[in-house]
Amino acid sequence: MNRPINRQPEAHVPAAAALIGALAVLLAAGLTALGALAAVDASVVDALAAALRQPVGSAFPKSLPTWGLWSATAFFGVGLAWAMLSVPGVWRRVVLWICTLLLVAAWAPVLALAAHRPTVGAPLVAVLWVGVCVWFYASKHRLPCDGAEPPIRAKRISGDT
């Protein structure tokens, strides 16, 4: 039989998820060290302080511990990469990515209501980077969850009842 040969290499989900997640956390850490995410966090703080009708300086007296922010960033980075590489189909991966972006973005108002300074720049960058990298990796590799070949559809004969 003439079946198309799939020339894409086999994907290694655990290694790819760990590397993509680690690179996302490193990117977020690098941008934080350079001060690029301070503007993102400051604009979120200004918008939420205005929404709560409080002055910016006194709106959020508490802040998250640094270890909590970076552990959440690492969790979302590696966890989202693993989850996206473990589900079949591009559409499911996109839905998972968008839902995770919305979940991370929803942290800001929750933290503001708890009087914590909303710092969501690093997790947002990590989730954005993971989504782009997984999309590229999945397009170039054959994932075990997608199967070896596309399913065969049975033809319907018009005379069958």
Image: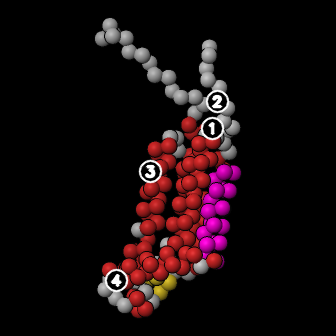
**Image quarter of residue 34:** bottom right
Label 1 to label 3: alpha-carbon separation: 20 Å
Helix or strand or loop: what does disc 4 sit on?
helix
**How far apart are the two marked residues, 2 and 3, measured between alpha carbons?**
26 Å
Is residue 79 visible in the rendered structure shown here?
Answer: no
Labels 4 and 1: the sequence-earlier one: 4
Mark 1 or mark 3: whose residue is earlier in sequence:
3
First of labels 3, 4 by sequence position: 4
Image x and y of residue 111, in percent: 43, 77
The disc label shown at residue 105, or none:
none
Residue 6: which numbered mark, if any?
2
Helix, strand or loop for disc 2: loop
Q: Is residue 112 left or right of residue 125?
A: left
The amino acid type, in three-letter code, at marker 4 is Ala
Which of the pair 111/49 is nearer the observer? 49
- Indicate which disc residue 142 carries: 1
